[in-house]
């Protein structure tokens, strides 16, 4: 695991947890300078994605390591944690387990897919292999690109292709084992229903273009979530509009002058 620290040396620490097959630098490169001007920022790179060798094992094992770090280096308390996509599952697990305290737990466009072991193995074999090839080549299969253009249009597809290219550059040394373990473990690691913790507010960055079913999942897994609707696709706000993302973050944590 690698923890990169930037920004102010104060009590308001922001923890950033990247998504599937992403490094923190790629996932949060656009927003770290904005956050670092005001907060102490800690970016996490998971086992297998930190450039130090080793493999990603399970969501639970990585969550324990994050908890240990927060307890040792942050006295067990974090002002805010933002989890992008898969990172949102880590944020949910941290709140659910209650071994550290997070004042503002922010879920970023996470799909929160849950699956049984058999189904997860099938999905990992099919989708995982395709995702690994995309990481190796930095592009989508032609059939997938054509499908995306029909479903989402050229503008959104081009943005998606840019993200895939960036993922490929940032994770080019990641093993197939780490990638598959991460994908599989995210599916089979249970996230409880109606999660809550005293003194913690769960905020959801809800990308409306993902579909209405995700709202149901957020309401299922979290008690009284602050759902912040955004008319974008999956993490589009984070990757392509960092200033707007920062404004939304500030509103979540009560630091905006507009709140």
Image: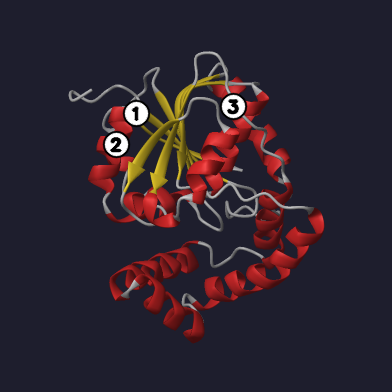
Q: Which mark is residue 35?
A: none
The residue that appears at 77% across and 53% down in the rendered structure is 116
Under tag 2, what secondary structure? helix
Q: Name the outermost residue toward the right.
A: 118
Which quadrant of the view contains residue 131?
Answer: bottom right
Estimate how packed mark 3 is, as few (under 14), some (14 to 19) or many (20 or more) residues with alpha carbons within 10 Å: many
Q: Position of residue 97 (x, y in %)?
A: 67, 26
Q: Are marks 2 and 1 in contact (CB under 8 Å)?
A: yes
Q: Which mark is residue 248?
A: 2
Q: Closer to the N terminus: mark 2 or mark 3?
A: 3
Give the spatial CA distance, label 2 vs label 3: 21 Å
The residue that appears at 70% across and 65% down in the rendered structure is 123
Circle 1 is placed at which residue position? 252
Which quadrant of the view contains residue 48?
Answer: bottom right
Q: Name the outermost residue toward the bottom.
A: 142
Image quarter in which the C terminus is found = top left
The residue that appears at 29% across and 30% down in the rendered structure is 250
217 left or right, relative to 238: right
Q: Are marks 2 and 3 in contact (CB under 8 Å)?
A: no
Estimate how packed mark 2 is, as few (under 14), some (14 to 19) or many (20 or more) residues with alpha carbons within 10 Å: some
Q: Position of residue 216 (x, y in %)?
A: 53, 42
| Residue 2 seen in this snapshot | no
The residue that appears at 47% across and 75% down in the rendered structure is 138
Under tag 3, what secondary structure? helix
Circle 3 is placed at which residue position? 95
Under tag 1, what secondary structure? helix
Q: Position of residue 251 (x, y in %)?
A: 28, 29
Q: Position of residue 248 (x, y in %)?
A: 29, 36
155 left or right, relative to 62: left
Q: Nearer the viewer, residue 15 or 173?
A: 15
């Amino acid at each position: 695991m690698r923890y990169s620290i930037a920004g102010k040396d104060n009590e308001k620490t922001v923890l950033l947890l990247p998504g599937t097959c992403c490094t923190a630098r790629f996932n949060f490169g656009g927003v770290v300078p904005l956050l670092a001007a005001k907060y102490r920022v800690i970016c996490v790179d998971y086992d297998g994605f930190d450039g130090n060798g080793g493999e990603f094992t399970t969501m639970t094992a990585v969550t324990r390591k994050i908890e240990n770090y927060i307890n040792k280096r942050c006295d067990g308390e974090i002002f805010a944690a933002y989890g992008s996509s898969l990172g949102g599952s880590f944020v949910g697990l941290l709140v659910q387990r209650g071994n550290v305290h997070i004042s503002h737990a922010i879920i970023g466009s996470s799909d929160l897919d849950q699956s049984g072991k058999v189904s997860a193995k099938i999905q990992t074999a099919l989708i995982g292999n395709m995702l690994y090839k995309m990481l190796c080549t930095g592009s989508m299969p032609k059939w997938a690109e054509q499908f995306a253009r029909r479903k989402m249009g050229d503008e959104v597809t081009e943005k998606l292709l840019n993200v895939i290219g960036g993922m490929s550059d940032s994770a080019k040394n990641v093993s197939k084992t780490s990638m598959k373990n991460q994908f599989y473990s995210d599916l089979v690691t249970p996230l409880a229903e109606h999660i809550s913790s005293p003194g913690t507010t769960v905020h959801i960055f809800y990308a409306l273009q993902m579909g209405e079913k995700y709202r149901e999942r957020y309401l299922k897994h979290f008690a009284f979530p602050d759902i912040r609707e955004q008319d974008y696709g999956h993490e589009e706000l984070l990757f392509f509009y960092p200033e707007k993302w920062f404004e939304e973050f500030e509103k979540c944590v009560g630091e905006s002058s507009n709140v």
